[in-house]
């Protein structure tokens, strides 16, 4: 199983970045996909998620600025980040979660993360 993130970097406030996550080694279309982030000294938090059916959810702090999408044909999940703020600075992680009705998460896979730094 591999989740490989790319697209991070240094951007000025107000700028945009697009993160990508390439997945392999598991049935991608059967998994919910999520982006988490962890800033220095803070706990990892959920940024955005997309279900197998394509339903999305977002943290309040990124609603209206970030967009998550997936391409099951390419085994990829993406996070378009616009109007970036310094407080968006963090390591961003791709997560694949297999969910079972009435049980919750039964499998979790994580990428190594990609650094996003928003600074002038």
Image (cartoon, helix red, strand yellow):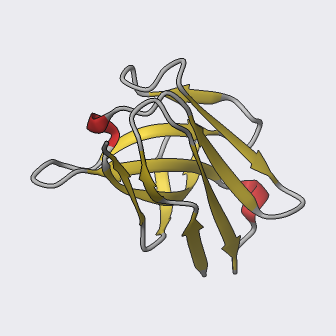
Number of marks present in the image shown: 0
Q: Residue furthest front?
A: 120
Extreme residue in the right direction: 73
- Kindly indicate the quadrant of the structure image that contains residue 60: top left
Outermost residue toward the left in this view: 41
Identify the residue at image location x=49%, y=20%: 63
From the viewer's perspective, is residue 110 above or below residue 49?
A: below
Instruction: Judge from the rendering whether residue 70 lies leftward or rightward of residue 114; answer left or right.
Output: right
Q: Quadrant of the N terminus?
A: bottom right
Residue placed most toward the observer, 75 or 8: 8
Residue nearer the viewer, 43 or 17: 17
From the image, which quarter does the C terminus lie in?
Answer: top left
Determine the image quadrant of residue 20.
bottom right
Q: Quadrant of residue 115?
A: bottom left
Q: Position of residue 44 (x, y in %)?
A: 26, 50
Check the image and report above or below for 91 versus 111: above
The residue drawn where x is 83% and y is 55% is: 72
Q: Nearer the viewer, residue 50 or 81?
A: 81
94 over 57 or under it: above or below: below
Q: Is residue 23 left or right of residue 60?
A: right
Residue 18 picture location, percent across and down: 62, 49
Q: Position of residue 23 (x, y in %)?
A: 68, 70
Q: Residue at 53% x, 24% y: name it.
A: 65
């Amino acid at each position: 199983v591999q989740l490989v993130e790319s697209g991070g970097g240094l951007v000025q406030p107000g700028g945009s970045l697009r993160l990508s996550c390439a997945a392999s080694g598991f049935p991608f279309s059967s998994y919910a996909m999520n982006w988490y982030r962890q800033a220095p000294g803070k706990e990892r938090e959920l940024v955005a998620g997309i279900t197998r059916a394509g339903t999305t959810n977002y943290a309040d702090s990124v609603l209206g600025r970030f967009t998550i999408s997936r391409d099951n044909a390419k085994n990829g999940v993406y996070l378009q980040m616009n109007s970036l703020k310094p407080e968006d600075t963090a390591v961003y992680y791709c997560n694949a979660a297999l969910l079972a009705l009435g049980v919750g998460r039964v499998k979790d896979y994580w990428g190594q993360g990609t650094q996003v730094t928003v600074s002038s």
